[in-house]
Amino acid sequence: MTSPCAPQPAASPSGQPGKEEMELFRGLILERCGIHFLDRREYALARGIQAATERAGIKSRRDYYRLLRDSDTDSALWEELLNLVTVGETYFFRDESQMDALRRHVLPGIISSRSRDRRLRIWSAGCATGEEPYTLAILLRELLPAIESWNIHILATDINKKALEQARRGEFREWSFRRASPKMKKRYFTERDGRYRLSEQIRRMVTFLPLNLAEDVYPSLATDTVAMDLILCRNVVLYLREAVIRQTMERFHRALLPGGWLVVSAAETPGAGNGLFIPQSFPGAILYQKGMESPPREEAPVRISVPPPSLAPPLPAPLERPAPMPAAAVPVPAPSPEAKAPSEEEVIAEGTALMGQSFYEKALALFETRLSQDPDNPRLLHLAARAHANMGRLQQAGALCRKALARDPLLEEAQYTMALILQEAGELENALVQLKKTLYLDGDFVLAHFSLSHLYARLGKMEESARHRVQALRLACGLESHSVVRGSERLTAAQLRGLLRAERGDGGGPP
């Protein structure tokens, strides 16, 4: 919580915030959400702040600022403000050159590389009202005549929850089609009273979830943000501060499979200079590809203090060797004991902490070292499986998780991880069975309810989806806000509540 001595915005006599107020609100939004409002967007920001203050029923912007400052970022108060100040401008088939590169080169290449397992995973980050992820779904339907035999998952995320609600409805006005062909509009939309309704076959290809790119909740199995073939994040990082941009690009890099692709706007360069991505040129567009082998993450070098050599001249050799001491009087140093190997609990604690910082390779090395001594340890096998899964290595993860469950079928966290691995691999019915096993072992496993709500929605069973979402929210409301939810590396209870409330369509408390 901010100190009471922190500066407060002075009241402005006009209907819009003054310069001092603007700087404080701008700084607060930057600190909490990583969103940087440029001077050219100042009027829109000021208008949004004033409207949010009025909608909150607060007369003084000073009181609104203080309340906003002391509220969780996932609260209804923040949701209302972000809905008013982050309205994204988008439309179908935006940036013709990039779409042409995707249609002619990138997507056919991904499809060819996935022809054996028939599995595709795409993420539209900062999707606004949904035109971009729906465009991708249409492109895939055009490119894949036998699309029903493929497991295709298109994840669409945004910080603006009201925009996500609109995206889920799949209804658009004429302005959203200013770069789309009439043929496409006629084929996939139904017009009524000036609004165009997207076909169900395209809408069900996309899953919409709220996500703040400035928060360290991805890549992770729990947020479904791993093992991606393609990520689009266009005209989003322009509004993030430099440190957040760097962190976001590093997380995108880890979320992509080797050889995966990142698409940003023409004005953005995703760390191509530091070796994260390889720029690839296409007619009128540059897209970025992850190398087949990931470069190691930079870390602060370890510095060892070594005493400087003595500058004094060497002592002259003695003229006579002194008589040796009697043997009994010579002190014999005790043999130094060998370094004690860390215990299982220490290895698990250290490895879990490393995974919470996304150091999956280091965590895996730690687990494997211990497993070389204790190869049938189910807890270590499960954690090694999670490390592999978070790096997109689903085959290795599945093998280790099955081995863990063979050793201990009652290990509910391994049951849950196995369900997520199956879901990522497109085995939805098997994932459903696995999640039910998890809840049989522990009915209060909140992430199992959370995942079941998503899985039932993908299967079109909306009543079951809503039931598990309500149960997950009830359980999440009973957890400490900053506690890490069991079954995840770093997702906090407050963040999970925000996700669940957004999916429910409100910012209120438990049902």
Image: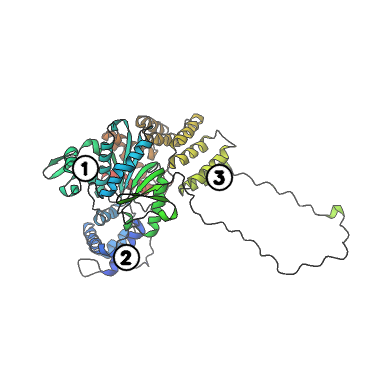
Q: Position of residue 504 (x, y in %)?
A: 27, 43
Are the two marked residues, 1 and 3, in contact with CB atoms closer than 8 angstroms?
no
Q: Secondary structure at mark 1?
A: helix
**Disc number at residue 343?**
none
Q: Position of residue 247 (x, y in %)?
A: 41, 54
Q: Residues within 10 Å of mark 1 (few under 14, many from 20)?
A: few
Rounded to the nearest angstrom, the CA distance separating label 1 from label 2 is 35 Å
Rounded to the nearest angstrom, the CA distance separating label 1 from label 3 is 49 Å
Q: Nearer the viewer, mark 1 or mark 3?
A: 1
Q: Nearer the viewer, mark 1 or mark 2?
A: 1
Residue bearing the label numbered 1: 169
Q: Is residue 511 visible?
A: no
Q: Quadrant location of residue 487? A: top left
Q: Earlier in the sequence, mark 1 or mark 2?
A: 2
Rounded to the nearest angstrom, the CA distance separating label 3 from label 2 is 44 Å
Q: Earlier in the sequence, mark 3 or mark 2?
A: 2
Q: Quadrant location of residue 429? A: top left
Most extreme residue toward the left is: 193
Residue bearing the label numbered 3: 346
Vertical placement of 261 versus 467: above or below?
A: below
- Label 3 sits on what residue type? Glu
- Label 1 sits on what residue type? Arg
Q: Residues within 10 Å of mark 3 (few under 14, many from 20)?
A: few
- Say left or right for 207 vs 374: left
Q: Secondary structure at mark 3?
A: helix
Residue bearing the label numbered 2: 24
Vertical placement of 26 versus 473: above or below?
A: below
Q: Residue at x 25, y 42 (%)?
A: 134
Vertical placement of 453 versus 502: above or below?
A: above
Q: Secondary structure at mark 2?
A: helix
